[in-house]
Amino acid sequence: MTPSFSSRAVRGAPPLLAALSGLALALVLGLTPPQPAQAQSKAPAAKTAQEPATAATIRKNLSARLPKMPAIDEVRALPLAGGTSLYEIRVGQDIFYTDAQGQHLIQGQIIDLQSQRNLTEERTEQLSAVRYQDLPFDDAFTIRHGKGERQLAVFSDPECGYCRRLERELADIDNVTIHVFLYPVLGQQSTEKAQAVWCTASDQRARTWQDWMLKGTPPAAQANCSQRTLDALARNLEFGRKHRIQGTPTLFFANDVRAPGALSARQIEQQFASVAAKK
């Protein structure tokens, strides 16, 4: 396997790098050809550094050289061909690479040129994967169409135009239970409307939400909303940060498939068919 390091991740540097401001990073950059859509196999199995001493050396040296760097959660040796010594370090959900002595820190993406696979992206997806059954359903409200036998979860922002488009598509789908997670990421108005929806009586949240998203009727502000109630929105935001829900709407299906964007009713039905086929 021949690794290549791409500069594309530098443009979208993770928040961690703000803590490293003013510190020199050794960036290894390169150009890579586009990845074919079918290259979606899993990342190769890396393993925790075989020699505990190596992991300890990496942690010690990086901590000494980058004192503002948060604690390293994991050190793994990467299975690269040709005897290349490269180690993955994980800090929260952020991935970096270093050598066995922790003398260089590489921030970027590794591409397997033979298989055209983005190994960094695959690893990130593994870390942020969500099983449908593990979603925090207590922090969502439910909309039921018909018998509601099919299951769908949606992270949605009340000020998101694509979320409104999705609501119109969902209105045409029968026999589905939709779990709506309010995910206000588009500014203060999003936060205020999400709070107004969530702070209504629990049996009125779905109607209040649909009145706003489908009819344009703003939710009335609720003066007496406890912090305990509002904490659900904070938990949704934290869950999304942890699992890299980076846009709205984001849909989750019962077969653990994540689908970002305003899917059409036809596309949603196709996903439901895939769920049914695996039962």
Image (tube, rainbow, N blue to C red):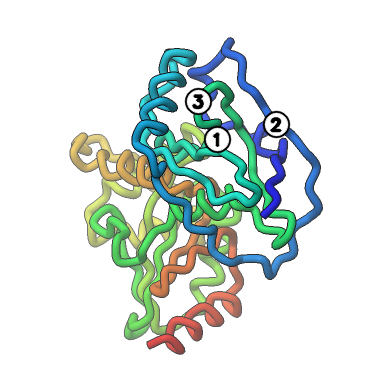
Residue at the (32%, 59%) spot, across then down = 135
**Horizontal placement of 110 versus 126: left or right?**
right
Q: Is residue 220 visible?
A: no
Q: Quick one: which residue is furthest to the top in this view? A: 22
Mark nearer the viewer, 3 or 2:
3
Find residue 196 and report its horizontal and vertical position in percent.
34, 43
The answer for how far apart the CA atoms under marks 1 and 3 are is: 12 Å
Q: Label 1 is placed on what type of residue?
A: Tyr
**Closer to the N terminus: mark 3 or mark 2?**
2
Q: Give the number of callouts.
A: 3
Residue closest to the eye, 204 or 3? 3
- Residue receiving disc 2: 28
Residue at the (63%, 51%) spot, across then down = 81
**Horizontal placement of 111 versus 178: left or right?**
right
Residues packed near mark 3 inside 10 Å, few (<14), some (14 to 19) or many (20 plus): some
- Residue receiving disc 1: 97
- Residue receiving disc 3: 101
Pointer 3 and pointer 2: residues touching (CB < 8 Å)? Answer: no
